[in-house]
Image: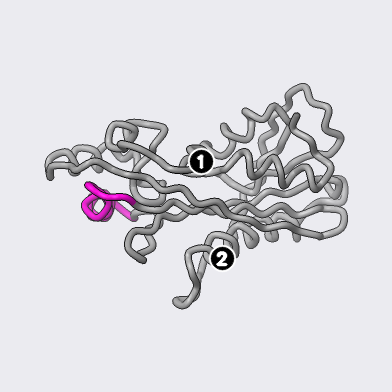
Amino acid sequence: MRRSYVLETTSVRSIILASTSPRRAELLSSLQIPFEIVPSHADETILDHWTPEEIVTELAKRKAEVVYETLELSKRDAVIIGSDTIVVRNGLILGKPKDVEEAASMLRMLQGSSHTVLTGVACIDGLTGSSQVEYRSTTVTMKALAEDEILSYARTGEGLDKAGAYAIQGLGAVIVTGIEGCYFNVVGLPLSLLSDMLANFGINVL
């Protein structure tokens, strides 16, 4: 499935977002540059010894590479963006929960303490194949939650497709007491970092 977001812009290059995440699409559209969505079905297998930083940067690059490798000739002037987000608590990496029970388990680990959210961003030039991969880190503090609150939030299903089992931009905002770093990084796409990266490929947001 391909979707296009077309807005007025001074950019001469097209952008492809290698993601099916509606949150990333919404964030990217806020930059007021046109882009197309091409789902990436990259292998997300990771190695046990990888650091959190290596995980998000490698997976972000894989997602962009899969789309780059299947790029139509007419799309070669595009810059492909891939991204990946994880949550880390005391060295334990939390991805997306597989069900409500696992979501509740993650929330029990996160409640009443701080954790780190890392998002990797990869940009690949469709013409040259050159790439840039970076990541951003944000510290999030979650308030202490009673068991019934944990179960109630987990059962909403809001966190089932999100790393760490919560959505800071949704109902999950009521369980977060503070952040240190980029808010958009927690949502799934650090916009200031992405803007700087796109400038290196000839796309100036401002």
- Where disc 1 sits, the SS reads loop
Crowd class of label 2 (few under 14; some 14 to 19; many from 20; radius 10 Å): few
Q: Which residues are magenta?
A: 98-114
Crowd class of label 1 (few under 14; some 14 to 19; many from 20; radius 10 Å): some
Tell me: residue 149, above or below residue 91.
Answer: above
Q: Measuring 54% from the left and 60% from the top, which residue is drawn there?
A: 56
Query: Magenta segment, principal secondary structure?
Result: helix
Whole-number angstrom distance, CA of label 2 to CA of label 1: 27 Å
Q: Position of residue 155 (x, y in %)?
A: 23, 40
Tell me: residue 66, above or below residue 143.
Answer: below
- Where residue 177 sits, quadrant-wise, is top left
Which of the pair 121/37 is nearer the observer? 121
- Tell me the quadrant of the picture where the C terminus can be found: top right
What's under tag 2, amino acid-wise? Asp
Q: Measuring 53% from the left and 42% from the top, which residue is drawn there?
A: 21
Q: Which residue is mark 1?
A: 182
Which of the pair 40/181 is nearer the observer? 181
Q: Position of residue 3 (x, y in %)?
A: 66, 35
Way the structure is coloured: one colour
- Tell me the quadrant of the picture where the N terminus can be found: top right
- Where residue 33 sits, quadrant-wise, is top right
Tell me: residue 24, above or below residue 171.
Answer: below
- The first of marks 2 and 1 along the sequence is 2
Q: Judge depth for marks 2 and 1 and give the one in front.
A: 1
- Where disc 2 sits, the SS reads loop
Taking the image as shown, residue 147 lies to the left or right of residue 57, namely left
Q: Position of residue 140 (x, y in %)?
A: 37, 45
Q: Position of residue 125 (x, y in %)?
A: 80, 53
Q: Measuring 73% from the left and 24% from the top, which residue is drawn there?
A: 7
- Where residue 204 sits, quadrant-wise, is top right
Q: Which residue is mark 2?
A: 43
| Residue 49 is covered by the magenta coloring | no
